[in-house]
Image (cartoon, helix red, strand yellow):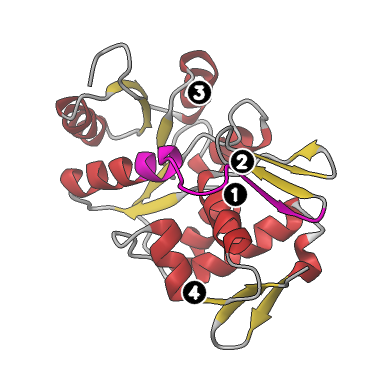
Amino acid sequence: MAAGTAKKILIVEDEKEILDLVKMYLEKEGYRTCAALNGVDGLRQVKSEHPDLIILDLMLAEMDGLEVCKRIRTDPHTAMTPIIMLTAKAEESDMIVGLELGADDYVTKPFSPKALVARVKAMFRRVERKEEGPSRLLYGALAMDLLRHEVTASGREVPLTAKEFGLLEHLLRNPGRVLTRDVLLNVVWGYEYYGTTRTVDVHIRRLKQKIPLLNDAIVSVKSLGYKLKEL
């Protein structure tokens, strides 16, 4: 990809050996990179460098990755920037906390740099893919503009992460159909995702928090998944 059009990736990682390794693999694939060794500098670079994607370590000095993620998601200018979180903690509870705060993907250490690059590529494909069919999906007072990657509820724009957007899009495209957690994981997260189906539940809950009109519209189907009621 040409230098001027290459995606920029911010790596926030306090272990310099890992940072340099990830940086090297990403640059070999043609991506531009910037880097930070602590949370405070990472947040500063999010604002100054305007990265297209952020690789964020959980355990950071000065400000941990969860706090950095929270601040990124609460700023309207960066709320939709994809975040892949890195951590040495493999417990599901840590993964859930990261997803609750808005991380789009989750990779546990030790990891293969090639596998991480594959996750990055998959993330960009999901964010940028040109969808066939209508460019605008409507559901009552909810409107999704696929070309602008925007969602509005009663005329008010709602900032969504890439995963939240993808999940809502699939629900809107399939009203009245029961969508299993496995199907949603495969469609929204992709075959390379290694997390649990609880990830879907976390994101459904976050969608309902951000868009209250979905509270009754998205119905949980016991032991299967979710369904968007037909209007």
The residue that appears at 47% across and 19% down in the rendered structure is 45
Q: Find numbered disc 4 in the image and state the secondary structure of the residue it sits on.
A: helix
Q: Nearer the viewer, mark 3 or mark 4?
A: 4
- Give the labeled residue for mark 4: 181
- Give the labeled residue for mark 2: 70
Q: Which of marks 1 and 4 is in front?
A: 4
Q: Find numbered disc 3 in the image and state the secondary structure of the residue it sits on.
A: helix
Residue 195 in picture, x, y percent from top left: 39, 66
Residue 26 in picture, x, y percent from top left: 22, 31
- Give the labeled residue for mark 1: 101
Nearest to N terminus: mark 2 or mark 4: 2
**Relative to 115, does residue 181 appear above or below in the rendering?**
below
Nearest to N terminus: mark 1 or mark 4: 1
Q: Distance between the residues labelled 2 and 4?
A: 26 Å
Amino acid carrying mark 4 in the image = Arg
Residue 7 in picture, x, y percent from top left: 34, 24
Residue 161 sits in which quadrant? Answer: top right
Quadrant for the C terminus in the image:
bottom right
**Relative to 94, does residue 33 appear above or below in the rendering?**
above
